[in-house]
Image (cartoon, rainbow, N blue to C red):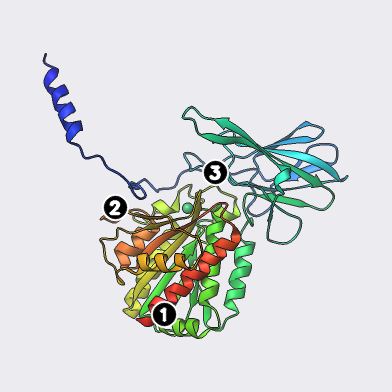
Amino acid sequence: MKYLAPIVFFIFFMACKPTQQWSGQGPINVVPTEDKPIKTQVYRDFDLGDGFFISNKMEGGRLNDAKRVNDTLIEVMILPENQPINPSPWYAFKMWSEEEKQLWIRLTYPQNGFHRYYPKINKRGLYYKKLDSTAFHPHYKTLEDGRRQIEFAEAKLWVGTDTLWIAAQDFAGTAYVERWKGKILENDFVEKIEIGQSKEGRPLEILKIGEADDQKMLMAISLQHPPEIPGFLALKSFVETLCEDSPQAKKFRSKYNLYVMPLMNPDGVARGHWRHNVGGVDTNRDWINFNQPEPKALAEFMESKVRETGGEFVFAADFHATWEDIFYTINEDLDGNHPGLIPKLIKRSSRKIPGYDPNIRPSEGMERGVTSSSYFFFVHGAEAMTFEVGDNTPRRLIRQKGETTARELMRILNRK
Ligand SMILES: [Zn+2]
């Protein structure tokens, strides 16, 4: 009988406990962000016989092992930089053959489960194209909870003496982003600022766009998570639109300065990481502790900017990619430096895309959290959002979303 009281109390407690329904991103708990060890892949050319070679010796490369199964099937193994880690299994490698032949490449992920990114191929240049759907064979597995996931996937490829690259997204490594930055820098109203260095000594660079007096500033960042290239593509068209030679964009640039850091995790991108920086940490959980150099440098830059100019950040967006298009926003009951800007912006820009219904997930949190957008809002008062596009969102729609967001933002802010 002596156990009855606590049991009755427990039942009473459970019945009274309000059921919480998350309409948005659940609470992201404060997690340790001190350095964790990572496992560096061995960079090498795998000689798989019969004149066929496969290699991870490239920027952005990820291929941990490779073996020949039979005459026409090669199996590759893809592993993360460390664990635990989000299931974003990035891969990128290249291959060539002394004799032109058709081969199947089987992508396997022994440590983390399943295949996620539809293969893209590249025969020359920086940009990869989707593999023809007839050449892609996913092998599904039904999990205990009934979900179906791709356990491994096979790609049918013609390989010859010319190198053929394959990757999880539209580019691999930092070269594509660097070339784009160079193009944006051709505008006379853009300058480059180095705000620090990554753990491996790569420059952390910001583009300053606009010729205003820094009283009203905006911030846009991408690629905290290396495979989230569709997020960078959205940022790219957002920024290009703000750089246009139109009366609207010129007016915007005379009143506002936009700061852009497109490559937040250069080491992770260069090393083909699934998610973390070289400190082995998800930098988007470090915007409160600042143990990692990349978020720390940006926060110091923003804070010094405010201190030196007396200005403020009115808007900030962090571009990512995930399974689907989502806008993670700040609790709508909280006001920053331009109350109502984000809901208005999402509503107006989405209306410009026929048939597009935005998926908006306002946070329920009232307090500062660990992510970039929480930092932007709670420390700077910048109206902030995490702009997530889907892994497979058509690139034309990504461009459109970046453009319409920039146009409507200018329309709203120019009126101020
Ligand atoms: Zn992300």
Residue at image position (49%, 81%) is 249
Q: Earlier in the sequence, mark 2 or mark 3?
A: 3
Label 2 residue SS: loop
Q: Is residue 271 above or below residue 302?
A: above
Q: Is residue 153 visible?
A: yes
Residue where numbered disc 1 is placed: 256
Res 307 quadrant in image: bottom left
How far across and how far down the image is residue 335, in percent?
A: 27, 66
Q: Compute the Cα span from label 3 to label 1.
A: 39 Å
Distance CA(mark 2)–CA(mark 3): 32 Å
Q: In the image shown, does 45 or 62 lie closer to the viewer? A: 62
The residue drawn where x is 48% and y is 68% is: 352
The N terminus sits in image quarter: top left
Q: As rendered, which of 28 and 411 lies closer to the eye?
A: 411
Can you identify the residue that label 3 sits on? 81
Question: Which numbered disc flags the more N-terminal residue, 2 or 1?
Answer: 1
Q: Position of residue 282 (x, y in %)?
A: 45, 49
Q: Residue furthest top?
A: 1
Query: Going from the N terminus, do you reach mark 3 or mark 1 first?
Result: 3
Q: Nearer the viewer, mark 2 or mark 3?
A: 2
- The reply to whether callout 3 and callout 1 are in contact (CB within 8 Å) is no
Rendered image: mark on residue 322: none
Direction from residue 246 to residue 18 in the image, left or right: left
Q: Is residue 113 above or below residue 304?
A: above
> Which of the two discs, 3 and 1, sits closer to the camera?
1
